[in-house]
Each structure stands twice: as C-alpha cells, then as structure tokens.
Amino acid sequence: MALSKRQLFQKRRMRVRSKLRKVNAGRVRLSVHRSNKNISVQLIDDVQGVTLASASSLEKDLGVVGKNNVEAAAKVGAAIAERAKKAGVEEAYFDRGGFLFHGKVKALADAAREGGLKI
C-alpha cells in the first residue's frame, strides 16, 4: 500500500534530522515549522532538552500576524537571529524538517544569516 502524504513528510523529516544530528553533535538546532497560515522557528539545545529562543509569525510585535509569505518568513528569521544573540548563540545547524529548502524556508534562513547567526 502506498504511503500517505503525511507519512512521507514524517519519513523525510526523520531522515533529515538524523543525518544532521550525526554531523552536528553538540551544536544548537534551528528548527523550522511551516503551516498553511504561519511559520515558526525555535533554537533548541538537544543536549539539555530546552528551547533557547523562538519566533513566530503569530507574534503581534513582528506585524505579520496571519500572514505566511516570504516577507513574513524574513521578519521571523531576523527576529530569531536577534534573540539568538541575546541567548548567547552564535552558530546553529539548520533543521528544515520535512520542508524543502525553497521559498519561505530559504527566506527565513537567509534573514537569520544576515542577522548574524551562522547556519
């Protein structure tokens, strides 16, 4: 029986995440989640199991509530870079999950890089 879209997505996410963990042991993970209406990102320390910083298009101070486009993703990326500096994080590895590195996900990563976060 063929796998559903959700099963394929989860399989792709676990494949990406396991490959990244092997290469980037001990570094902080920048995890992205994109839905149809919003985009969010977290800085996660997997060793201690805590979230160091997060940003989302749901936050009113970013001015992109309810929008899920490239501009909103860029603002979220800039916000996570700023919050990473406050948390003392200078470099992280980019965990795109099961999403393609294209469009909104790429815009978020580029904005975080421009904000000073080494990805």
Image (cartoon, helix red, strand yellow):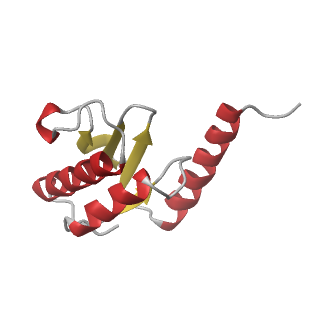
Determine whether 34 is above or below 102 in the image.
Answer: above
As displayed, is residue 40 above or below residue 88?
above
Q: Is there any visible trace of residue 49 in the rendered image?
A: no
> Which residue is drawn at the image coordinates 51% and 67% (left, top)?
23
Give the number of callouts.
Answer: 0
Residue, x 16% and y 41% (percent of image)?
A: 62
With 30 as the anchor, is 95 left or right in this view? right
Query: What's the residue at 55%, 54% (across, down)?
Result: 100
Using the image as rendered, state which of residue 55 and residue 103 is in the foreground.
103
Give the image location of residue 111, x and y in percent. 27, 61
As drawn, the residue found furthest toward the right would be: 1
Q: Residue 114, position in %: x, y? A: 23, 68
The image quarter in which residue 110 lies: bottom left
Q: Position of residue 86 (x, y in %)?
A: 10, 54
Horizontally, residue 32 falls left or right of residue 100, namely left
Q: Is residue 2 visible?
A: yes
Q: Is residue 110 left or right of residue 5?
A: left
Q: Which residue is drawn at the image coordinates 15% and 51% (left, top)?
A: 83
Where does the image place residue 77, in percent across and percent down from the top left?
27, 53
Horizontal placement of 107 versus 15: left or right?
Answer: left
Q: Nearer the viewer, residue 81 or 27?
A: 81
Q: Is residue 90 above or below residue 57?
A: below
Image quadrant assignment for residue 3: top right
Q: Quadrant of the N terminus?
A: top right
- Quarter of the image with the C terminus is bottom left
